[in-house]
Amino acid sequence: MIRGKFHAPWEGMQNRRGLTIIELVVVMIILGIMVLIAIPNIGRWLPRYRLRSAARDVASNMQLSRLGAIKDNREWALLFDVNGQSYSIITDKGPDGIWGTPDDTQERVVNLSDYTNVSFGDNGHGPAPGGGPVDDGVTFVNDRAEFNPGGTSTAGTVYLQNNRNDAMAIRVDSSTGIIRVWTWDSSWKRI
């Protein structure tokens, strides 16, 4: 037989304390104030994030085309449709040997409308270093970046802008095929 004092489960709970309704209301008010402070900052940050995301995707798709051309030992291209605000990755010219015709093998189409308020252009900031005249936002000849099996490309720049006066430029160097990204921050800066 076990001897000793028996303790009921509720004994000793007098010292424990939960949240009172007043403490809970104070916490909710503090969280509400923090959310109200954060919302305007998100509104300023989001357009730039979308622009950076679109520029990163253009640069990544250029790199994909460059590496695909090297791997497949044939030309790949990005065809930019400035009026349609989109671009296509083409992996083969097709039997006619001409870029941009229905018999091309298309890897994918990217629509700038997916990035909300991002379009081709430079918001009037002018060309990035080595970028050439901006015009419609794409300086590649025939709005086409062609990558050959040696990894080099036609030279050109793609300019992207948003509705907040931000701009980015993605440039391909013809002699090396190196892809560089520039951003506008009171002047063009390479990132």
Image (tube, rainbow, N blue to C red):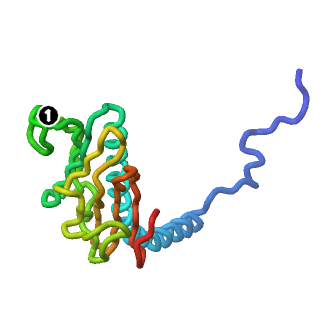
Give the residue displayed 31% in from the left and 32% down from the top.
73
The number of discs equals 1
Q: Name the residue under label 1.
A: 94
Mark 1 secondary-structure assignment: loop
Q: In this view, does 110 lie to the left or right of 17?
A: left
Identified at 24% across, 56% down, the residue is 112
Viewer-closest of 38 and 16? 38
Tell me the amino acid under the disc marked 1: Gly
Q: In this view, does 53 lie above or below 152?
A: below
Farthest top residue in view: 1
Between 32 and 85, the residue placed more toward the observer is 85
> For the residue carrying disc 1, how many other residues have a C-alpha within 10 Å: few (<14), some (14-19), or many (20+)?
some
For this orientation, the residue located farthest to the right is 3
Give residue 80's position: percent from left, percent from top: 20, 54
Viewport quadrant of the N terminus = top right
Name the residue: 8% across, 39% down. Answer: 102
Look at the image and tell me whether residue 47 can be seen.
Answer: no
Q: Which of 56 and 125 is in front in this view?
A: 125
- The image quarter containing residue 185 is bottom left
Q: Position of residue 54 (x, y in %)?
A: 32, 56
Among the 4 quarters of the image, the one containing residue 147: top left
Residue 189 shows in this picture: yes
Q: Position of residue 123 (x, y in %)?
A: 27, 74
The residue under the point 76% across, 55% down is 15
Residue 55 position, x and y percent, is 34, 58
- Could you tell whether 150 is left or right of 142 in the image? right
Camera-side residue of 62 and 85: 62
